[in-house]
Image (tube, rainbow, N blue to C red):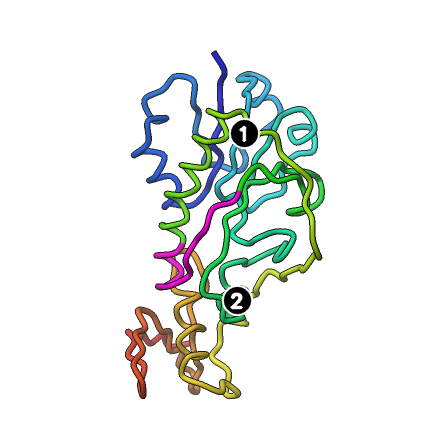
Amino acid sequence: MHKYIIATIKDWNINQYNKSIYKKSKNWFLVTDTEKLTIGYVNSIKPKYIFFPHWSKKVDSKIINNYECVCFHETDVPYGRGGSPIQNLIIRNHKKTKITALKMTDKIDAGPIYLKKQLKLNGNAQQIYERASKKVYKMISIIVKNKIMPVAQKGKVVKFKRRKPEQSVLSKKTKSLNDLYNHIRMLDAKTYPTAFIKHGNLKIEFKKAKINKKTINASASIKIK
């Protein structure tokens, strides 16, 4: 009987695992600590696959080269390789994307592809992440059940850059309400730097944005710096 590891650090993926059939299986193992995923630990299990719904740390080459590691990226690769895929898509006014399951290699998001699934980009980032998580676990089941062989990526490579916390500030150069709305909602997720403005020694953060034809309504919190 094959064994499997799911490695993730995000609450929404951990919660989805706890709701899944894998939670009760002795053949599935959940890793939520980046320090725990060592070659020694992996060798003790000898998994058929290691799945990475979300992992923010570079994986040891010894693991990548000796085990079949599958990561998930919310773009239609090779378009959108790199960091902050959801945010980079929304800021470019994409309405939908694809979640790509690909074999992990030493090059970021460059490995061969197992399968892709459609993902809508409406709502805030947290809602999108939770929606994506449900699809990712379905993709995991498909890969395991059908023993899918990955195929090489085709097409023009477009790379995204990981966003920095200081980029969360609302720009004075914002040209439209839609751009402002997208900026707030794409950052509205747990563990992500929230959209904000500075006024003197005040930092005003915005969440839960809703847009109509003429205005945006959002929740604001104020911090004194």
Q: Position of residue 15 (x, y in %)?
A: 33, 40
Residue under the image location 45 percent in, 51 percent down = 118
Badges 2 and 1: C-beta atoms under 8 Å apart?
no
- Mark toward the start of the polypeptide (2 vs 1): 1
As drawn, is 140 to the left or to the right of 207?
right
Tell me the kind of residue under disc 2: Pro
Numbered tag placed on residue 22 in the rendering: none
Q: CA distance from mark 2 to mark 1?
A: 30 Å
Disc 2, SS? helix
> Does the magenta portion include 89?
no
Q: Is residue 199 left or right of residue 76?
A: left
Can you identify the residue that label 2 sits on?
165
Find residue 103 and report its horizontal and vertical position in percent. Answer: 62, 36
Residue nearest the viewer, comparing 176 with 208: 176
Q: Which mark is residue 50?
A: 1
Residue at 67% in and 60% down: 158
Q: Is residue 116 above or below residue 163?
A: above
Q: Residues within 10 Å of mark 2 (few under 14, many from 20)?
A: few
Residue at 42% x, 86% y is 199
Magenta span includes 120:
yes
- Nearer the camera: disc 2 or disc 1: 1
* Highlighted range, magenta: 116-128
- Identify which residue, 169 or 118, lies in the foreground: 118
Q: Position of residue 225 (x, y in %)?
A: 42, 76
Q: Quadrant of residue 82?
A: bottom right
Percent of width and height locating residue 220? 31, 75
Identify which amino acid the numbered label 1 is placed on.
Answer: Ile
Q: Is residue 193 above or below residue 71?
A: below
